[in-house]
Each structure stands twice: as structure tokens, then as C-alpha cells.
Image: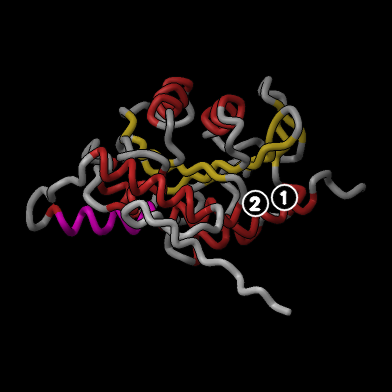
Amino acid sequence: MPAPSHLALRQGIIDICREMNSSGLNQGTSGNVSHRIDGGMLITPTSLPYDQMQPEDIVEMSFDASYEGRRMPSSEWRFHRDILKNRTDANVVLHTHSVFSTTLAVHEKGIPCFHYMVAVAGGIDIRCAPYACFGTQELSDYALEALEGRTACLLGHHGLIVLAENFARAMWRAIEVEVLAKMYVHALAIGEPPRLTEAEMTRVMEQMRRMSYGQAPDIDGVDDTPRPRNVA
């Protein structure tokens, strides 16, 4: 039997799924991961434990919902397909039932701008989509709406979705959002925390953008970007 196409991406999906579980970000087979390919995506199969998964088990699926392989795609293939079809800024969609994000989601509560790191999801907050049954088009539609202008959202009574350019960035963002969710849950034990202003969150996002280009933060309008010394 010939080797499956996109072998490195298939192995990357398996590796990140196993990392999700070993890190405590996910449990059992409840999460799923996809990666963009030409005309479609690679996605985890349904109901297969990650430690048993092999590259040939990863399902190749077109945006028209046709698929190839020996397994059926994840039951959540619709929102993976719709996100990758509509969000050309993302290559990876990662979904987990991480504990603190899901704790907020079961209360239909998003993550407000109580901490500046909320900006890692691309905006001033992390929204929670309304509840819809898993695997449905309704859930996918709600997820797309909650992700507008964002790279993460919660799903009501369900879990977390993050988008990213690559596997490493997806794992980083999922952990960051889960930590934020944990901090917010703990902060709520004292009372609803105060919010940062929209203007301050906009400033934070600009700082993050600058630093992603290797520049120093702009402190009070002073350009203090580090510069290499002239070497003779």
C-alpha cells in the first residue's frame, strides 16, 4: 500500500493530539484537530484513541464534504470545514474540552478583558457561542460568528476552539486561553473583576503586533527598538 499523502501533516496532527492529552488540555477522544490542504483539510477520525492513531487514520476531506481514507472524519468536521473555508488566515483548527474553558462555556460565559493577555485571541474579549448540538451545521454557524475577528472562542456547554497558522502556534494559543479561563474562574470567586478599557486593549494588541515583528514595545511614543552594534 502506498504511503498516504501529506505524511508530515498527518503525523503533526497525531503529535498535537497526544500533546493535548498529556498536557491535560484534553481528555480521551473528546478533542479534534484539522489542517488545511489544497481544496480541503486533513482531520482526525471519529472515536479513535490518540495513542492508537496512525498517519493513515487521518482523514483527507474536501470542502465539498467528500472524504478519503479507512476512517470516518470527526463528528465535528462541519465547523472545521467551514472555518478553514472562510478563514484563510488559519491553517489549523484545534478543538478541546479543556476544563476551565468548558467551565465558563457551561455558564455561557465568555472571557472579558479582565487581563491584557486576552488579546492573544485577536480582540478585546473571547466570545462564547450559543449552544447547539455537536456535529450540526447550527453549531458551525455559531462558531463562525463567535470567531469573527478572533482566533479563539468558547462553545456554549461544550468547549474551546482555537485557530492558528501552524501546530505549535495552535497549541500555544490553546494553553494561553485555558490559563486565562482558569484565572478568570478563580477571580470570579472574589467577584466580577474590573475590565481594561477598549482603548487599552487596542494598545495591547498593537504592542503584540509590534513584538511579533521583532520590535520592542512602543513605550509612550519612544522608539527604543533594540539594534545590533556595528561590528568591524
Q: Is residue 205 above or below residue 171?
A: above
Q: Residues within 10 Å of mark 2 (few under 14, many from 20)?
A: many
Name the side, left or right, on which 208 lies relative to 5: left
Which portion, as a residue range, is magenta? 177-187
SS assignment at label 1: helix
Name the side, left or right, on which 154 lies relative to 37: left
For residue 112, the mark is none
- Number of numbered discs visible in the structure rendering: 2
Task: Kindly identify which residue carries mark 2.
Answer: 13
Residue pushed farthest bottom? 232
Determine the CA span between mark 1 and mark 2. Answer: 5 Å
Q: Is residue 63 above or below residue 210?
A: above
Name the side, left or right, on which 187 lies relative to 145: left
Task: Kindly identify which residue carries mark 1.
Answer: 10
Dot 1 amino acid type: Arg
Q: Quadrant of the C terminus?
A: bottom right
Dot 2 amino acid type: Ile
Residue 48: in magenta span: no
Q: Nearer the viewer, residue 40 or 210?
A: 210
Q: Residues within 10 Å of mark 1 (few under 14, many from 20)?
A: many
Who's the residue at 30% across and 37% down the image?
157
- Which of the 4 image quarters holds residue 127? top left
Whether tag 1 and tag 2 are in contact, CB under 8 A, the answer is yes
SS assignment at label 2: helix
Who's the residue at 17% across and 45% down the image?
195
Residue 180: in magenta span: yes
Residue 187 horizontal/vertical position (percent)? 16, 57
Residue 211 horizontal/vertical position (percent)? 48, 56
Who's the residue at 44% across and 22% down the image?
141
Who's the residue at 43% across and 31% down the image?
149
